Amino acid sequence: MIDIFSLTANKLVEKLKEGEISSVEVCTQYIDRIKKFEKDVKAWAHFDKKELLEKAEEADEYRKSGKPLGSLHGLPVAVKDIIGTLDMPTECGTVIRKKMTGSQEAEVVNLLKIAGAIVMGKTETTELAYFHPGKTTNPHDYSRTPGGSSSGSAAAVASHMAPLSIGSQTNGSVIRPASYCGVVGYKPSYGLISRSGVLKQSDKLDHIGVFGKSVEDVALLTKVLIKKDQHDSSTIHYSADEMLKVCKKGPPYEPKFIFYKTKSWKKIDKESQKSFEFFIKTFQKNIEVFDTPSYFDEIPKYHKVIHETDMANNFQVYYKKSKKKLSKEMISAIERGMKYSAKEYAEAIDFMKQSYKSYQEVFEDYHGVLTPCTTGVADKGLKSTGSPEFCTVWTYMGLPSISLPLLSGLNNLPLGIQLIGDRLDDLRFLGVANWLEKNCKKYAK
């Protein structure tokens, strides 16, 4: 039998399409893997092996019919447990929604099914995708956090319990867990992937993101999720047909980057600082180190105003009816959100537009911006999911960002590099990310 865990998702899809391996065989290997590691990693909020095998059998029968196949036909994909599914619970990491399903199937789930993918189960999230941790541990060290809020989505891919997964980010919820767990985590530009049928924290800040083993794997998945959706007014018409092709091709010439250490550099542990310094030195002909623009200092404040005001609005039913079942972190955030004025909220929205307008000229001269993803390797303990401070600026401006597992820190734990691109330049951006991933691996050999 083919060892699927040594294959990228792209290779796995090819073998499924050619009939070299069946979907049942693939899913059976994942079931065995989950049996072995789930008791320690705890990445799944809902997983039913019988359901999965039934879907796999259907996928195999369809392939034998000779009908046209979608680009992900027969491939199992995990989805975060804030994403609506009618045939599985959508509990959103809170006891308030125990055993409840979504009121509608999320658009990303519909698009997965159209592409022939199998929704293999629901992955753990922090409470209502905010800060209060769920049960998931870090696959590299069970005593450490996997990051959040897309904890299970990152951990499932990192522990080879899923080839690909879908998560979400409102601050640092894709980039941080990807860095901690040592996988590729990609948050596309704001407006590319529909949030319809997904738990809403903040309409202005919520993004859908994806996890995989490589840049080409996340391109494979993202390509099928990008589509204008009438039920999500933020989405736009965007041609992603060539996404994987452009990603594989890479940039026509060697890219140039800015590296920001940012004012949070001093918070990074010494071992991680050494790794970043080595990376900068290795790519010194491609990288210029700069200080961040002064107006970046205002962004965390404005992000917080929007985030907490929107949570106060969107989670008011939970707060009014089930306050005692919410964590202290959630209650505090909602109550702060109730106190912001209309003027403060309007200013925060206006500054979002102004800051991007001021910043976008950077991408006329550089292919991307590099920063740490986090303050270091995964934090010890499971009571916190770590700080999102290295992600806030880029999420606020709606820029595409990706965590690349290119470095290691303390105890040889994974350490991600964050690459940021220009808004809606995602095809070229992934090509640049692919170049960086491949070239960094060359230096590592």
Image (cartoon, rainbow, N blue to C red):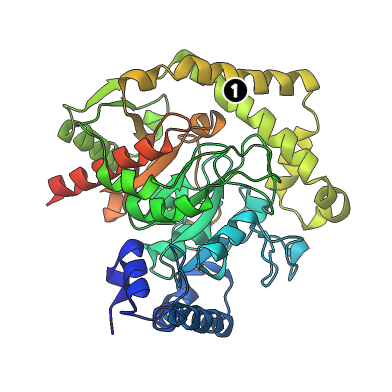
The number of callouts visible is 1
Q: Is residue 329 left or right of residue 241?
A: right
Task: Tell me where residue 126 appears, x and y as whole percent.
Answer: 61, 55
Name the secondary structure under disc 1. Answer: helix
Q: Residues within 10 Å of mark 1 (few under 14, many from 20)?
A: some
Amino acid at pointer 1: Met
| Whether residue 314 is situated above or below residue 67 in the rendered picture | above
Q: Which residue is mark 1?
A: 352
Q: Residue furthest right?
A: 321
- The residue shown at (33%, 52%) is 216
Does residue 120 appear to the left or right of 107 in the view shown?
left
Residue in view at x 66 percent, y 60 percent: 93
The image shows residue 273 at horizontal and vertical percentages of 29, 36
- Which residue is nearer to you in this view: 279 or 65? 65
Horizontally, is 89 left or right of 68 in the view?
right
Q: Residue at x 64, y 31 (%)?
A: 304
Picture coordinates of residue 80 (x, y %)? 57, 59
Seen at 40% across and 53% down, the residue is 218
Task: Choose top left, top right, bottom left or bottom right for residue 336.
Answer: top right
Left or right: residue 329 versus residue 123 is right
**Place of residue 428 in the rendered image (x, y in percent of width and height, measured from the top left):** 35, 36
Residue 78 visible, this orientation: yes
For residue 154, above or below residue 74: above
The front one of 246 and 175 is: 246
* Occupied quadrant, residue 240: top left
